[in-house]
Image (spheres, grey):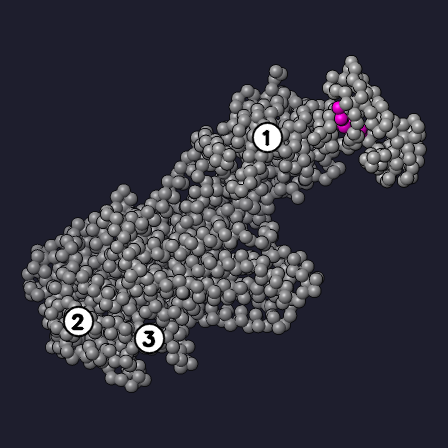
Amino acid sequence: MAKTKLLIVSLLLVGLLSTAGLAAETLTIYTAYDADQAQVYIEAFEAANPDIDVAWVRLSSGEVYTRLTAEASNPQASLWFGGSNTSHIAAAKAGLLAPYTESLAWQYIAPQFKDPEGLWIGLYVGYIGFVSNTEFLAEAGVEAPTSWQDLLKPEFTGEITIAYAFASGTAYTTLGGMLTAIGSPDPGFDADDEVYVAAFSAQVGQYNSSGSAAATMVGQGEFGVGIVFSHDIIKKAVSPGYPVVMTFPAEGTSYEIGGMALIKDGPEPELAKVFYDWAMTTEAQDLYEQFYRLPLNPEATLAEGSVKATDVNVLPIDLIWYGDNKDAMLDKWSEVTGEY
Amino acid sequence: MKLNVYRRELRGEFRRLFRDPVLLGIVSVIFTFLAIFILFPLVKILQHSLWPNGAFEPKYFMEFFQKVYYWRPLINSLIVGALVSVCGTTVAFIFAYGITRTDIPFKGAFRIVAMMPIVSPPFLIALAAILLLGNHGVITDALNLDWDIYGLPGLVLTETLAYFPIAFMILEGVLSKIDPSIEEAALDMGASKLRTFLTVTLPLSVPGIASAGLLVFIRSLEDFGNPVVIQGRFRVLTVAAYHAVTGRYNLPLGSTLAIFMLIPTLMIFVVQKYYIARRSYVTVTGKPSGIGLKTTERRIKIPIFIAMLALAGIILMVYGVVLFGSFTTLWGFDYTFTLANYAYVFKVGGQYVWDTLRIALVATPIGGLLSIIIAYLVVRKRFVGRGMMEFVSMLNFAVPGVVVGIAYILAFNNPPFQLTGTVFIIMLVFIFRRMPVGIRDGIAQLQQIDPAIEEASSSLGAGFFRTFTRVTLPLVAPAFLSGMVYMFVRCMTAISAVIFVVSAGVQLLTVALLYEVDQANYAAAAAYGYVIIGIVLTAIVLMRFVVGKLFKGGLTPLGGE
Amino acid sequence: MADAVVQFENLVKIFSEGSKKEVRAVDDFSLSVNRGDLVTLLGPSGCGKTTSLRILAGFENATAGSVYIDGQRVNDIPPQNRNTSMVFQSYGLFPHMTVKENVAYGLRVKHVHKKEINTRVKDVLALVGLVGLESRSVAKLSGGQQQRVALCRAIITKPEVLLFDEPLSNLDAKLRKGTREQIRQLQQDLGITSVYVTHDQAEAMSISDWVAIMQDGKLQQLGPAEEVYSRPANRFVADFIGEANLLPGVITDTNSGGVSISLYGSEIALDRFGSEFTRDQAVDIVVRPEAVDIVDTPDGDISATIQFSHYTGSIVIYTMRLEDGQELSVQVSNPMERGVLPAGQIVGIHLHRKSLHVLPKEG
């Protein structure tokens, strides 16, 4: 009996002692980059700032927005790093972000890539593309899609994969593109848009939580076609060598501004600003090269093979409007597709 | 007359409770815990569903039946549950029958294979299903098949494999405890083996089969990991609720969906506990007879053996392909052997391993102790509200993990109980989720002890605390420690509740695993899976060793003949 | 009243199992136990004796009525705070402890000093002849030894009341007799007030100061063994203790102190019961099988036909039939002196006047 007691007590001690963690300076951030990417960026930051430890959670942009709403009375994190800025805009509207206009970066970034009050700033841009598995295309006897309408072809029924619009910035950006390209280009759902989105949803074989997963799945041959940001398509499908081809819709494609923001009443505002400043530096933005993202710092290096504005037809999407009306848009999307 | 008796007894019980301060203290503390950590969160769910903004406004309740995309997932969940229940119980019965009632070889190996799904997170099987039977899976390609594993087929396959071990454990117990002389009597009167089986063995097993089937039904209804991976467009309720909360922060909708998840599971739980369990015909004499009727006829043995081989083969294939996948470079494309995935797990996930382990190691003894104390109070003591204590502490058994997760967010996000973002909320989820099983086992262990032993201790002047620590605990220690291992395993493989409460400071291995699957990084996911399996197996082996050393002879309670 | 250490006062216990049926296990039970006495609660299973004992110990709670120990009402006091110790049917020894640890348990609870514990353990083990077994694990003892350890454990704490719950049921017959003598001897030497429960009437009769016979939760009779045997209070007691023949009769005459009873055509006169019965009252006469002589037919009070003889060596038990078909059981010692009588023989039965007991005819 004594031995058992010893065993239990020692287990408890081990656990409890380790629970009392040692606190260096710790910065808590939410990031929408894929975990392996985020790891690279954050480790680079920690190397440049050795006295700051970063604790981070990876969530898709829609999920970050949800998390901030849930934590509004007691924010757990101080910085939001990455993810389509439509979510940042929605969060700004809901009063969840803190302004920061004193950074050097905020001075030189062009107005269309930042919030006028400094509630968010743009890190990079990306363009939505289609990725198709070439073996699937050969078997199905169909060409890779080059327009939004192509996606409704019967050969693609059940073969398309994309993320949930409410979870992922990729998918919400795609939705914005569809609504602009189909029917009237005015923001929001019109009658043609409803028909299209419903028909498109019926083509989808599997919805994911994370935007870039579709690229990997298409590469592996699990699905035939995916809709993903081009930088993710290159990084996850083309560059590893999967049998894939990337195409873009001829009517014009959608784009995102990857954003960053200070979280209102976050626990470590000063540390967050250190990270914020660092993220806009050339050294930091040079890291985007290996992931094929297009940095907004004009002195950062562009990757070979990355897709630039001049390579595609870009739709005139009102990102601010889509950010401000995100909740209503998602409600409508749920109704039309039956997914929520 | 009865009411008077009841009232008198009640008053007497109150008086007695106040005369015994130690008992009073413990009972009060436990009731407080149960109220805060089981009832309060459930109340919050009701509140957010029916009174979302302070006023009574059951918007989603009303809409639930009007909008197809709200109630469709409920129907889907029930369909899957029913199918999984039938398939799982059948598979379990074949295994149980083969092992207890025939003389086929390799029984030990079959038992191990039948219990394998317990040591891994259940949704690892969904991963394997994709690797094997996905659109570009190993088997799909090899046999050039044209099917879609996503959706109902995938759900039924994965959940059957994941949850049949539960049914197996129940049926193994039931089949081995049937008094052999009953069957021998039937044969003696001229019935054939088949007739005996159909008219004696099977009917006697029916309550056990029903129990097993219902429990598998509950597990299927509350499954979150498998559907998230493989449901395709066949939406089930757990995933819908998860998205409502984490995707849209729509707490009223999430709470409403949670209630619709709760209703079937609670109903099934009540039916199983109060209706079927009462009708058990099996003579539980505490010792499985083992010398039950063994079938040696080849025409029965052989098909069963083949079926078991096939099923075992499927399970081995499932775990095999995941093991294989963990060593590949780029699943679906480049199968070169590499250790990079494990390196990735320990690099990125090293902190997760540590976090998960330390939380599990703290939660397990606390949960175990709490369970045995409650079991003791319920079995041995009579006090006001005993029945209520038993009911509430077992309640979580019927509450789906997703519901617990949502409920805990609702309950502990704000003062006075602001626990979100901490390690403690995860520990609480672990402790109170696993408690019902611990209590049930504790009750079974305590019932093996002659009550006279504890009464003797009281008779000699020892109060509750001394009796419990000096007499009761040492006697249940071996089984208690083994029970704790099971708790630990469940902590390491849990997903559906904890996925709601992880935060920046604390990450868990299962959540990391799910993320990798979600990202279609199947090789990395497989590596995570086997790291978890490795930890769990180590714990099991370690505990067996420790228990063996500490309790060499085992302890048999005395009691006269 | 003499020094009553234990008092049951109108004790009632109702079990309501599953809200379907109510069982009155103890029904208005009252009893006093004096200091130093051993009182046995005796009766068939289900009579309420064990329940009453457990209520006294504190393991069950009374539905109504009171229990007093040394004048204090103990109904709401938990068992560990009552000054009672119990010896259980299954002994209840702690299997993970040694003999010494078991016996010393009650003293450790009271934080008695270690040296004193050692002395007292040794002393009490000596009383039952178990010295030298202190470090033996109790699991390794024989049934009889375990029983004695349980006894030591209970008495070492010098309880106010010692309780026995059928302590000998699990022992084999030979051991039972010796052990019960030992228990009685110990109880008397130490002078501990004891309440003893058993269904074995021979056991009850041989060790008790008082026997309390219970049935259906009610006390049927309380008295010393001889009284309960020779002057049973009712049919049940008469039947339960030993064998009893109940012969129907009618009172023909009463006078100062005595009665005349007519049965089977004969008249017998007794010098007691005069004030208890009236003329023409129907009665049952309790005749013990050994309280008769077999005589020649004309010399007997009644005549009977032998149906069956059950010879066991030291005695023979005859089953006889009386003229109205009533059965009569007769026991004769040393049967070889006269020889065993054959079936069918008609004999005369002489009743031992002093051993007869008369009961009013019941319902």
Asked if one can make out residue A116 in the rendered structure from this viewpoint, the answer is yes
> Tags 3 and 2 in contact by the CB under 8 Å rule?
no
What residue is drawn where x is 63% and y is 37%? C46
Residue B173 spot, x, y in % from top left: 55, 57
* Disc marking residue A13: none
Q: Residues within 10 Å of mark 2 (few under 14, many from 20)?
A: few
Q: Amino acid at mark 1?
A: Asp
Residue B245 spot, x, y in % from top left: 27, 57
Q: Is residue B402 left or right of residue A113?
A: right
Magenta-highlighted residues: C281-288
Q: Is residue A207 left or right of residue B278?
A: left
Is C345 covered by the magenta stretch?
Answer: no
What residue is drawn where x is 57% and y is 72%? B303
Residues tagged by mark 3 and mark 1 found on one chain of the structure: no
* Disc marking residue A191: 2
C-alpha gap between disc 3 and disc 1: 78 Å
Q: Is residue C297 left or right of residue A183?
A: right
- Most common secondary structure along the magenta stretch: strand
C-alpha gap between disc 2 and disc 1: 84 Å
| Residue hosting label 3 | A222
